[in-house]
Image: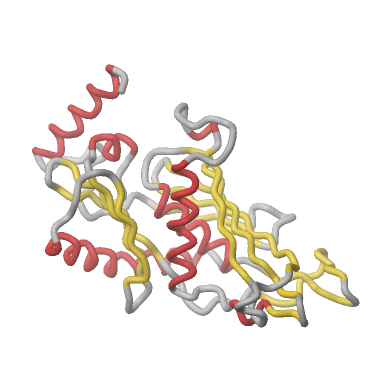
Amino acid sequence: MEAIDIVKTSYIKELIAKGIREDGRKANEFRKIEIVSGLIKNAEGSAQVDLGATRVLAGVKLNLDEPMEDTPNQGNLVVSAELLPLASASYETGPPSPDSIELARVVDRGIRHAKCVNLESLFVEEAKAWTVYVDLYVLNYNGNLFDAGSIAAMSALLSTEVPKYEDGKVVREERVSKLKIDNIITSSTFAKVGGKSLLDPTANETNAAYSRVTIATDEKYVRAMQKGMSGGFSAKEIEELIEVAFNNHKEQKDIIKKSQK
């Protein structure tokens, strides 16, 4: 860690000890969420999300593939993520980094376990089904890629239109239906700094943290959780954070749905 980072981390810890966040938010308050859907015209679906200064772009493509052997009457979902060098000085070109792999897995797990995409509706004919590819691109980083990525992926999926399939060919210029979405998932990420859990941590708060947890929920259930960093949370703390995540779900869901109008 460079000297300037050490100074920033110490400053953040001092603020948190006084009950103050660097941007003035309360402990359980998200930054402003802005969503623009349909930005990528040659994709089947897309959405750009600004979570504070963190920006993530999601693009969705549908390709015809052979179904998995154990689910011959279903399509598939594949999520990938790329941390672009323009987003942060710490990101480099090359093979997928551990951070990009974790981002893709966390977003995928929430969507998959909540059964957001109706995979049965992706079946086309024997040995052919649509695979839904969700590609996440981090355009600017200021903390909390998990929640920004989840919102972007969910918004892009809701905007997705299925191409026409006729006489054994995909006609991408024609769209026949909306992708069938059965559920909406959202996530809430908390970073623990000086014994206090902060919702939607900034980059500086993340650097000062010693523990992190992401909780993905729909209206009724916790669908996935991801723990990060070396520190931990007590059972009571997790229960409290789950309650916060459920409270946040409705607000995030409403913002996501409004972006589709």
Q: Is residue 186 above or below residue 202?
A: below
Quarter holding the C terminus?
Answer: bottom right
Q: What kind of colouring is applied to the model shown? A: secondary structure
Residue 250 visible to an observer of this rendering: no
Of the pair 22 and 106, the residue shown nearer to us: 106
Q: Is residue 204 above or below residue 185?
A: above
Q: Residue at x 22, y 55 (%)?
A: 28
Q: Is residue 120 above or below residue 36?
A: below
Of the pair 183 and 93, the residue shown nearer to us: 93
Q: Residue at x 29, y 19 (%)?
A: 4
Hey, which residue is sitting farthest front in the picture?
A: 69
Q: Is residue 39 left or right of residue 254?
A: right
Hey, which residue is sitting farthest left in the picture?
A: 18
Q: Residue at x 31, y 19 (%)?
A: 2
Q: Position of residue 149 (x, y in %)?
A: 47, 53
Q: Position of residue 136 (x, y in %)?
A: 55, 50
Residue 163 visible to an observer of this rendering: yes
Please tell me how many numbered marks the rendered image carries.
0
Q: Position of residue 111 (x, y in %)?
A: 48, 67
Which quadrant of the structure image shows residue 114?
Answer: bottom left
Q: Residue at x 30, y 64 (%)?
A: 248
Q: Is residue 32 left or right of residue 26?
A: right
Hey, which residue is sitting farthest top in the picture?
A: 3
Q: Position of residue 93 (x, y in %)?
A: 58, 31
Quarter holding the N terminus?
Answer: top left
Q: Is residue 155 above or below residue 23?
A: below
Q: Is residue 249 left or right of residue 124?
A: left
